Image (spheres, grey):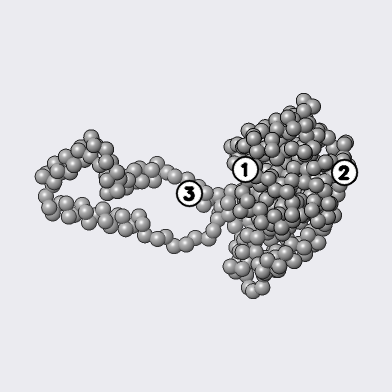
Amino acid sequence: MRTARILVTGATGFIGSRLCELLSLEYRLPYRALVRDFARATRIARLGAELVAGDLADVASLAQALEGCDAVVNLAHGDDRGARKQTRNLVEACTRAGVRRLVHISSMAVHGPAPAAPVLTEANAPIRRWREAYSDAKAAGEAVVVDAGRRGALETVVLRPTIVYGPYSFFVTPIVHDARAGYISLIDGGRGVCNAVYVDDVCEAILAALDRDDAVGEAFLVNGDCRITWRDFITTFAGLVEGDKRIHDHALDEIAAHWKRQRPRLRDNFGATLRLAASPEFHAQLGTIPLLGRTIRGTKELAGRLVSPERKLALKSRLQRRSIAVHRPRPPTPLIPSEGRVVREAYRSWVANDHAKARLRWRPAHSFEEGAKRTADWLRFARLI
């Protein structure tokens, strides 16, 4: 590989940490890890790698981090709203530093939260604003990188991973925690297609993108080869936990009805306003404003002269009963999955990886059975099962 030193941004994340391990222990390539929060860097600190403090929002830190680097792997993703600006900061810093190649890790989410079957290849999958924060943020960041490549400012390669799993995966650990609590959570019977790719295979795709010249200017979907359902994926990892477990299957209409009930209604806003207006704490805060304080005290004194003691007692009793009713704990309800999880697991389409195989000369090396076994070994090591 023709590179002097690689800068890895997002190095403390799930994929970034594994990439650093492989760069240190298997690939033996020189790299530097950009670290925003050193409290999250314990996994890569043991590798003896060069760690440098920095943030994509801090231009000066990027200039320092890029010294002596001729390639960058961008795995960083902070706040969705700042994705475009932060990616632009990195691209501009790379250009000034004379970086040769930028491999940008995007996501299949750029094609929308639920792309339809005919658009699941790089050639015809649209990228536009989807009115979904994560998809739009990933698309905005990717657009900055693609533009830099077209202008000739950098050699750029974009990778769009699917559902990345493995040790430390946030797709796996919640399943295990649920199973330890005695249940398995499915959406729509778990019939959705799980486009799962093992984390080491994603890292291999990153290395291929750094190396191959015919990948420059291209974007690649990075998916595994195993066509499994979300039921297969979830029950595989839940089954590693001993003990009886009940399956809770969240029907899509049940989830939709729950979300509809959660939308605030006009009377909810009106009731909340009345409760705030009657709150002694609110009155106390208003009383700190001299003019309002005098008005409130005067109004109370006038009401005290006009309302009889019996009427005051009746009003106070009614308000107390209403307050108790409002704050009475409600019986627990089954935990409804998040919107992101519902979109992900209700998905019914397979994502193609043919372009990556043809142009990157890459193919996933791990079957789902192999990836699940390696993940299970880590779960035992971490004493989660």
Q: Residue furthest bottom?
A: 243
Number of residues whose C-alpha sits closer than 10 Å to that of mark 2, classed few (under 14), some (14–19) or many (20 or more): few
**Type of amino acid under label 1:** Gly
Residue 328 appearing in the image: yes
Cβ atoms under marks 2 and 1 closer than 8 Å:
no
Query: For the residue labelled by badge 1, is the local secondary structure a helix, a strand or a loop?
Result: loop
Q: Which mark is residue 262?
A: 3
Query: For the residue labelled by badge 3, is the local secondary structure a helix, a strand or a loop?
Result: helix
Task: Pick whichever, 132 or 186, lies toward us.
Answer: 132
Query: For the residue labelled by badge 2, is the local secondary structure a helix, a strand or a loop?
Result: loop
Q: Earlier in the sequence, mark 1 or mark 3?
A: 1
Task: Pick whichever, 44 or 343, lies toward us.
Answer: 44
Number of residues whose C-alpha sits closer than 10 Å to that of mark 3, classed few (under 14), some (14–19) or many (20 or more): few
Q: Earlier in the sequence, mark 3 or mark 2?
A: 2
Q: Which residue is mark 2?
A: 1
Q: Which residue is mark 1?
A: 78
The residue positioned 77% from the left and 31% from the top of the image is: 98
The residue positioned 11% from the left and 44% from the top of the image is: 306
